[in-house]
Image (cartoon, helix red, strand yellow):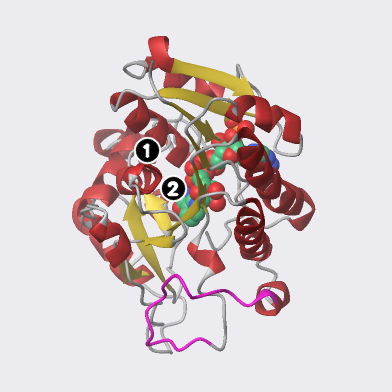
Amino acid sequence: MAVAVCVTGAGGFIGSWIVKLLLARGYAVRGTSRLADDPKNEHLWALDGAAERLTMLQVDLLDRASLRTAFDGCDGVIHTASPMHDKPEEIIEPIIAGTRNVVEAAADAGVRRLVISSTIGTMYMNPHRDPDAPLDESSWSDLEHCKSTKNWYCYAKTIAEQNAWEAARARGLDLAVVIPVVVLGELMQPSMNTSTLHILKYLTGNAKEYVNESHAYVHVKDAAEAHVRVLEAPGAGGRRYVCAERTLHRGELCRILAELFPEYPIPTRCKDDMNPPKKGYKFTNQPLKDLGIRFTPVHEYLYEAVKSLQEKGFLPKASATKVTERRSSPPQKQPAPVLISKL
Ligand SMILES: NC(=O)c1ccc[n+]([C@@H]2O[C@H](COP(=O)([O-])OP(=O)(O)OC[C@H]3O[C@@H](n4cnc5c(N)ncnc54)[C@H](OP(=O)(O)O)[C@@H]3O)[C@@H](O)[C@H]2O)c1
């Protein structure tokens, strides 16, 4: 019988790639969603092996019993489900209490290992950190700083991860945490997600200038691979894995996009051109390299992300761009406005 792994938030941007990878490796996958037959998760049924080895379950992160049922008999759990915006009244509970419930339910179900998707926002939001020291598993964001800057997503994810470590230790549960940066690449799901919106605004003409900021980026396939390797590798538990390929200033990101897709109105000016370009955080991704991850270069995942936006109708293709301009009609589909958190 196939080994079972449960993936929470299975139909999301990263979750979908994790499900695809697990099915390709022969696992039986239990995917969770707040709505089991949500049409936005239908793409999962087209995956190879889905008809035979995928089950979708309706799970509420705030209902520990529903999590326990989903995890029963599973070898591992990968917890990706999370809101990704900055409205505190909507995100604090599912992120903090939800993650706590996942840890307790995984311990109750006796799973071999739990892997949680955290975020780089749990590491770099700290005014006292040394900007020249690479972020590593000992780095933590400062909760007061997150609060005073109203980065409620980073605040909630930091508390959730810290509580998860404490609860896992108390329960003797093998926990490992993947810490993605801004994740980009081909979208499998039909809907827009927060990190893809990060680049969409530079392609549609909505952003006339770019901000003076730097962030780190990674390919969605590498992020999914990282979760699966961290789940599988025998000695991989008990660690936090920074999942990042490289840091780029927003100007460099726009320059690469313009090189790849000169047909779009990609900004060439910085909002804050009076000041020097802000440097991003440094990081070490060596622990994931040690697990065999070979990080894909940025040109490739930016290319795949834009192609995918075109294919899903979020962006007009090159020839359609001209028609659109002449008729002044909007692109085929507009993404829902989403508050961008610090990922
Ligand atoms: N994408 C990035 O750049 C990035 C960077 C750093 C960290 N991460 C982390 O990686 C994980 C996956 O991110 P993603 O980009 O794949 O996100 P995503 O596409 O938005 O998917 C997340 C899934 O979580 C579920 N979800 C959303 N709001 C929820 C709520 N209030 N309560 C319970 N479930 C909820 C949704 O599934 P249903 O609607 O089916 O329930 C959604 O499909 C998250 O934990 C995120 O914090 C992502």
Residue topped by disc 1: 309
What residue type is disc 1 on?
Leu
Q: Quadrant of the N terminus?
A: top left
Q: Is residue 79 left or right of residue 184?
A: right
In whole angstroms, how far apart are the C-alphas of marks 2 and 1?
Answer: 9 Å
Q: Residue furthest top?
A: 51
Magenta: main secondary structure: loop
Secondary structure at badge 1 equals helix
Magenta span: 129-143
Kind of residue sitting beneath label 2: Thr
Would residue 46 be found to the left or right of residue 338 on screen? left
Q: Is residue 218 visible?
A: yes
- The residue shown at (38%, 89%) is 276
Which numbered tag is attached to residue 196?
Answer: 2
Quarter where residue 133 is shown: bottom left
Q: Residue at x 60, y 60 (%)?
A: 165
Query: Is residue 266 visible in this depiction of the protein?
Result: no
Which image quadrant for residue 13?
top left
Q: Which mark identifies residue 23?
A: none
Residue 171, given in percent of the width and then of the height, sits at 65, 51
Contact between marks 2 and 1 (CB within 8 A): the answer is yes
